[in-house]
Image: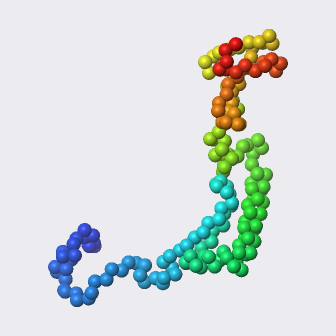
Amino acid sequence: MAFADPFATAADDTADAAPNNAPATNTGPWEDQPEESRTRVSLTFKASSGYDAPWVVVEGPTLAAVYGQVSGENAEALKAVFNLVAGGASYFQKLYASVEKPGAQRTGGQAGAQQRRQPSGKPEGATQAPNGEQRFCEHGQRQYKSGFSQKNGKKWEAFDCPDGICEREWANNRR
């Protein structure tokens, strides 16, 4: 079976063929389809920016058609759809939460992104200062702690009294 050379020029193809007097047309595969099926307009209404947020998509063949679906008499129906979607999403999330493993932390959506951007508290297992520094008070060896400020997001490091009696010593302050 022989295939036509896709890189052959029109002159190569017409050299052996009979002359064609039909006018050349510049048509694409969409030309034989009705106007309505060529263009699609879509409006997406999303409850929030998280991946787990519910959304409603309204589609139509033209902008005017989509506008008609979300305005006028349809506006009240759209509000009802939003309420149904929000209620359904809430119900589904409660079902999902009830089957999650106890103690498992969800990190999806905005909450997860926020946790990844701004860690809080000390890393698990960090009980010593990174440089191995130790400090003492009259109650024994102070405990190293670190975290991120909720006010400005800056990292802090400190040494606390093991009994919680003495004042905290900040790691950047020398006694």
Q: Which image quarter: residue 2?
A: bottom left
Q: Decide if residue 128 is on the left or right side of residue 21.
A: right
How many marks are shown on the rendered structure? 0
Task: Name the residue rendered at 57%, 70% in the picture.
Answer: 42
**Residue lying farthest to the bottom in this orientation:** 21
Task: Name the residue rendered at 78%, 19% in the picture.
Answer: 167
Q: Which image quarter: residue 24?
A: bottom left
Residue 141 position within the rendered picture, expressed as x and y whole percent measured from the top left: 75, 14
Front-most of 76 and 28? Answer: 76
Q: In this view of the protein, can residue 162 be seen by the observer?
A: no
Q: Which image quarter: residue 19?
A: bottom left
Front-most of 104 and 161? Answer: 161
Residue 89 position within the rendered picture, expressed as x and y whole percent measured from the top left: 73, 61
The figure's colour scheme reads rainbow
Q: Is residue 88 above or below residue 163?
A: below
Task: Name the residue rendered at 67%, 14% in the picture.
Answer: 174
Q: Is residue 146 above or below residue 89?
A: above
Task: Name the residue rendered at 65%, 30% in the picture.
Answer: 155
Residue 13 position within the rendered picture, expressed as x and y whole percent measured from the top left: 21, 77
Q: Decide if residue 62 is on the left or right side of residue 46.
A: left
**Residue lying farthest to the left in this orientation:** 15
Instruction: Look at the image and tell me in which quarter the N terminus lies.
Output: bottom left
Front-most of 62 and 4? Answer: 62
Front-most of 153 and 3? Answer: 153
Q: In this view of the protein, can residue 116 be seen by the observer?
A: yes
Residue 97 position within the rendered picture, expressed as x and y whole percent measured from the top left: 76, 51
Instruction: Look at the image and tell me in which quarter the C terminus lies.
Output: top right
Q: Is residue 111 above or below residue 58?
A: above
